[in-house]
Image: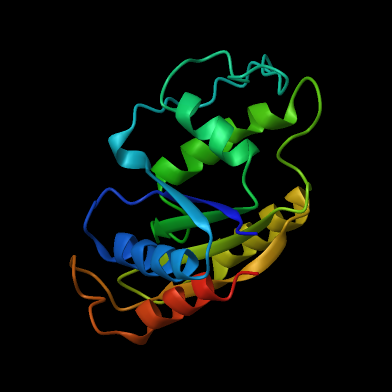
Amino acid sequence: MGKKIVILNGSPRKNGNTSALAQAFAKGAGEAGHTVTAFWLDGMDIRGCRGCFGGDSSRPCPCVQKDGMTEIYPAVRDSDVVVLASPLYYWNLSGQLRTCFDRLFALEEGGENLLRGHGRAGALLMAAEGHGFDDVLTYYRHLIEHLRWQDLGQVLAGGNRNAGDIAGKPELEQAYRLGLSIR
């Protein structure tokens, strides 16, 4: 039986290098028989977390704010795999992805913790101009550990400044193979 995979694409470039990695991953996952739902976060109205602790995982929309996250909550809640796709900005994930992930905290509040554990897995896809991924990998590993998710792996593609620079590079094949490898 195929898995439900959610890709959270935090790139502002709809056709950029991060998006190319996400598309390659989705192609492999689709060929492996999985259902892939991708969200291009920059095109969605997602406001920052207010830190109100008013979330409740038992509600259809667990957050008190009603915005683009109302589409994302049910998909993540029902997912087997969550893929974080982002360009590297100042040694970390993009603001779009961090904002979305901060808001997923509402799935941990109130009733049952629906984000942590549940046999879920995660993966990281990143493109960058440079090659300094150490800090974001530390963050990602802490996040995966906190959430008790299995780490399926990372594809880190440095040397990609302009949209399209990733074309023909081995990281696209790595992203495809990572998607294909999910069992």
Toward the front, the furthest residue is: 1
Give percent across and percent down for residue 149.
73, 56
Does the image show residue 127? no
Closer to us: 72 or 41: 72
Q: Which residue is drawn at 62% across and 46% down?
A: 79
Q: Which residue is drawn at 44% across and 57% down?
A: 85
The N terminus is located in which quarter?
Answer: bottom right
Give percent across and percent down for residue 183.
65, 69
Does the image show residue 50? yes
Closer to us: 43 or 36: 36
Left or right position of 15 against 182: left
Asked if residue 23 is positioned above or below residue 13 in the image, the reply reads below
Asked if residue 23 is positioned above or below residue 77 in the image, the reply reads below
Closer to us: 30 or 134: 30
Q: Residue at x 70, y 57 (%)?
A: 144
Give percent across and percent down for residue 4.
58, 51
Image quadrant in which you'd find residue 112 = top right
Give percent across and percent down for residue 40.
34, 44
Count of numbered labels shown in the rendering? 0
Asked if residue 160 is positioned above or below residue 100 in the image, the reply reads below
Figure coloring: rainbow
Left or right position of 166 against 103: left
Image quadrant in which you'd find residue 49 = top right
Asked if residue 44 is positioned above or below residue 170 in the image, the reply reads above
Q: Residue at x 39, y 67 (%)?
A: 27
